[in-house]
Amino acid sequence: MSIDVATIRKEFPILDREIDGAPLVYLDSGNTSQKPRAVIDAMSTFLEQSYAPINRSSYRLAGEATDAYEGARTAVARLINAPSADEVVFTKNATESMNLIAQAWGRANLSAGDVVLLTEMEHHANIVPWQMLATERGVDIRYVPLTPDGQLDLTNLGQLLDGAKVFSFTAMSNVLGTIPPTAQLCRAAHDAGALAVVDACQYVPHNAADVQAWDADLVAFSSHKMCGPSGIGMLWGRAEILDAMPPFLGGGNMIDTVSLDGFTTAPVPAKFEAGTPPIAEAIGLHAAINFLEGIGLAEIRRHEMDLTRYALDALNDRFADDITIFGPDNVEIRGGVLSFTFRDLHPHDVSQVLDERNVCVRAGHHCAKPLMKTLGVVATTRASLYLYNDEADVDALVEGLAGATDIFGF
Amino acid sequence: MPGLEDLYREIILDHYRTPRNRGELDSPPAIETNGHNPLCGDEITLFLLVDDASKGDAATVSDVKIGGQGCSISQSSASMMSQAVIGKTAGEARALIRRFKSLMSIEGIELQPGDDDIALGDLEALQGVVKFPVRIKCAVLSWNTLADALDRATSEPPASG
Ligand SMILES: Cc1ncc(COP(=O)(O)O)c(C=O)c1O
């Protein structure tokens, strides 16, 4: 069953916005997604009627706010098929979740000479926290290389995993769209005795995720890329792993008791939620999850596969050798992310020309500088698709690129 | 929104398509300086040759070569800059840097007497960049790199701006 994009678009107030009298063509959801009315309303209703501290005060309003906050945790667990909501930790964003993993798990488990395995298509959020640790601890980092069409080259995976304590990889590349075989990679990690960490920041918003089917150990993702507000992110982890990890940030809410001599920690998830969390954001996230589930994650994925196919064909047919689109051509293993180079134009100039037609794309290194180096470019232009995009958006991109030809006079 | 024609003036596109003074110089004697824009990944390598460096501001910029990759704005700006500064004294080049950065509305530039009178020539074409604030960084990348290179070449205290 395909989704009804025209109806879905009506749920996103910003898509009514016109700039200079023309509609918005938003193709930057891989960066951050737009918000449906349901999320905006849930947050303002909560702020108008139910806002109060959570976990701290005993009056009824505070109880209501606490229940609403915990309700969001239950929704997150359901979304990714986690066995228990207690295994879901709220953070600021996926980046903080990755830092939490590297700092809390990493510092407790890694020492000089230990190996961390990453891949060449990681976002900086899954590289730099490990590099920080590597510098401090003398840990070695290895990287799984890529095939020419932007898939993980798993030929030597066994060798790369040999001696590794952790394998941390993205479930969907934010540059190439590549969706690696996550369950297979988790199994390979476990066979080698390594922890399996999944950066699911791009995967969860666009696919039906199942952390149990993956058999992952720790999984990080962000609300703002899945129709929810910015300011809240998630970490899911197996209970026994989270229980064994030391805390990350210290302060209120994460303690059981504190004396002048020291502290003991609260049980997970509170152990990892120091300070006042993003409360209204959790409520907005809950509404976003309900919204996505109402449409169906599998249906959203199907729509994006169709639209990605349409976009790959439209761009390649129109521009042939003038465009190079990175990543696999098979949409079964690729999400709706199209990074490309166009003639010898710099991505900055491409996005500038597209902006004249309100076509919003990202130009740059996409927080993946090592990957840019592997691809042999300094930057790319990236159009990324979501449930509210349709063929007209892709057509606007194609026409915009054709317009660049006129300006730069090829 | 200001039109693209304000940004992509013909002379800018000309320098972009046919960049002047591209290449490398032997270093030493030339000074090699790298600049980059962390936001977009643009990189520039600037080779600066100065005669009589010990004369400080009175030393002469005898050659400039530019390498690296970037967008039309950063590339054309570097190309025009190289043409503008070759043959000038280090002091004149510094004054031109101040003048150009103030044209780009960069804050905190302390113009010195006479700076306003410096002729910009082709560089005037980059004025439209100011209407596209995200692109200002592209236009000034090579100029900041040149400022670094001049400081290193003449080992003087940093020029204001
Ligand atoms: C694959 C991937 N991982 C991690 C992140 C970091 O997410 P955030 O900026 O929300 O922390 C991003 C965001 O671009 C991403 O695409």
Image: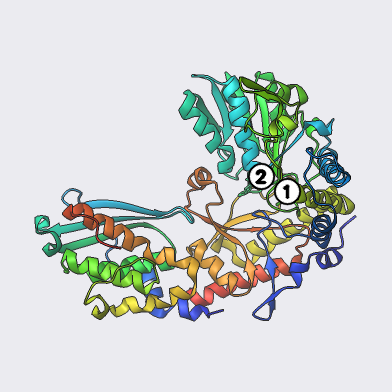
User: What quarter of the picture does the N terminus of chain A occupy?
Assistant: bottom right
Q: Amino acid at mark 1?
A: Ser
Pick whichever, A42 or A194, lies toward us.
A42
Q: Residue at x 18, y 57 (%)?
A: B49
Pick whichever, A332 or B128, lies toward us.
B128
Q: Which label number is shown at residue A223?
A: 1
- Whether residue A200 is visible here, answered yes or no, is no
Pointer 1 chain? A
Query: Which residue is identified by label 2?
Result: A93
Residue contact between numbered discs 2 and 1, judged by CB atoms under 8 Å: yes
Q: How are the residues colored? A: rainbow
- Which of disc 1 and disc 2 is earlier in sequence? 2
- Per the model, the C-alpha gap separating discs 2 and 1 is 7 Å
Pointer 2 chain? A
Q: Position of residue A233 (x, y in %)?
A: 70, 43
Q: Position of residue A153 (x, y in %)?
A: 60, 35
In which quadrant of the rendered view does residue A386 lie? bottom right
- Whether residue A90 is visible here, answered yes or no, is yes
CB at mark 2 closer than 8 A to ligand 1?
yes
Q: Amino acid at mark 2?
A: Asn
Q: Residue at x 48, y 74 (%)?
A: A408
Q: State whether discs 2 and 1 lie on one chain.
A: yes
Q: Is residue A354 left or right of residue A15?
A: left
Q: Which label number is shown at residue A15?
A: none
Q: Please tell me whether mark 2 sits on a helix, a strand or a loop.
A: loop
Q: Position of residue A293 (x, y in %)?
A: 87, 49
Q: Position of residue A99 (x, y in %)?
A: 60, 35
Q: Residue at x 26, y 66 (%)?
A: B82
Q: Is residue A194 left or right of residue A44?
A: left
Q: Is residue B55 left or right of residue A316?
A: left
Rendered position, A404 above or below A58: below
Pick whichever, B119 or A314, lies toward us.
B119
